[in-house]
Image (spheres, rainbow, N blue to C red):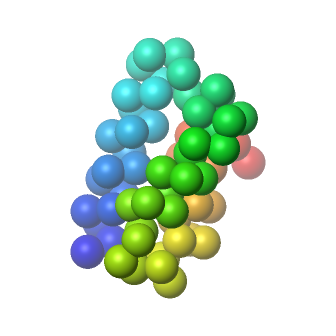
Amino acid sequence: MIHKILDKIDRMVAQKRQSGELQAWFDSGLARRYCKQVTASQKHYYPALLLYLERHAGHH
C-alpha cells in the first residue's frame, strides 16, 4: 500500500517541478495538504510521508 502512496507523491512532485510550481506548492502549504489527503485512510503514514515528500523535493 505505501508504495502506491509514494508513487502518487512522486508523480505530483514531478508534475509540480516540470511546471515550475514546486516551490510555490510547498510555500503555500498545499504540499502538506496533499500528503494529508493521500494518507486519509492510513493516517499513521502521514509523518513519514511528509518527511519523504520534503526530502524528495529537495527541502531538507
The residue sitting at 60% across, 72% down in the picture is 47
Query: Looking at the image, is 5 positioned above or below residue 60?
Result: below
Q: Nearer the viewer, residue 5 or 29?
A: 29
Q: Quadrant of residue 4?
A: bottom left
Asked if residue 41 lies left or right of residue 57, the reply is left
Q: Can you see residue 53?
A: no
Please state the horizontal and vertical placement of residue 39, each as a whole percent of the image: 42, 68
Q: Quadrant of residue 51?
A: bottom right
Where residue 31 sits: x, y (%)? 56, 45
Q: Is residue 29 above or below residue 2?
A: above
Q: Give 43 or 14, whichever is nearer the viewer.
A: 43
Residue at 58% x, 61% y: name it.
50
Residue drawn where x is 55% and y is 53% of the image: 33
Residue 3: x %, y % from top left: 29, 66
Q: Is residue 9 visible?
A: yes
* Quadrant of the frame with the N terminus: bottom left
In this rendering, the count of numbered labels is 0
Rendering coords of residue 20 (x, y %): 52, 16
43 left or right of 10 in image: right
